[in-house]
Amino acid sequence: MGIDWLGGKDVGPFKLEVESVRRLESELYRFRLFLVDGKGARSETPIMEGLYSAGVPSENIEGWIDCEYYETAGFPDGSAADFSQGGLHKELFALVGSIIPEGGSLMIAYDMFRGRTRLHEETARMLNSGAAPEATPIGRLLAEAGCGSSMKDWYFPEGGSEGHMKLQGFKHAKTI
């Protein structure tokens, strides 16, 4: 099950539409998740975008998603879907987390060039004040996706090519 599996899934009154492009000859995909409303109109802006890898099990590399989540998506008629209202983010992140394998991870940016919302601001403020990643709004989204274990704050991405500041959480294997 990959990122394209999310296409057509229901999130509240919306359906998800996925645009994904495989990068070169790797298992890495650039993706954007759009919303489609009940009238069939597609959002002009994505609700989420980023990178997806199914991993390489033969090399013990687990799947992961590194994304920016915007909370809102605008439609052509000027309306917007606000996922901070009514718990829609819980439905979305449960679906997103379902494609991450055990041992894999989900990363959500809290500092980005566009689309920064109260969710991102509050997460950054709390982290700067010494709060644990798990206590932040984005930490709670990671937990809702089933990726609430061993959270890490990438406040200074190593090497400079990992993108913006983000939180990362893992989906650990269930113990018996």
Image (cartoon, rainbow, N blue to C red):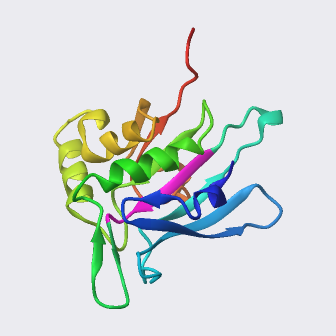
x%, y% of residue 60?
Answer: 75, 32
Residue 73 within the segment the image draws in magenta: no
Secondary structure, magenta segment, majority class: strand
Residue drawn 55% across the image and 42% down it: 98
x%, y% of residue 73?
Answer: 35, 74
Front residue (pair 162, 151): 151
Viewer can see residue 156:
no
Quarter of the rendering containing residue 121: bottom left
Front residue (pair 87, 107): 87
x%, y% of residue 148?
Answer: 41, 32
Tell me if residue 104 comes above or below residue 17 in the rendering: above
Tell me if residue 122 comes above or below residue 70 in the rendering: above
Q: Residue furthest toward the front?
A: 39
Residue drawn 65% across the image and 61% down it: 4
The part of the chain drawn in magenta is 64-71
Tell me if residue 174 comes above or below residue 29 in the rendering: above
Tell me if residue 152 comes above or below residue 33 in the rendering: above
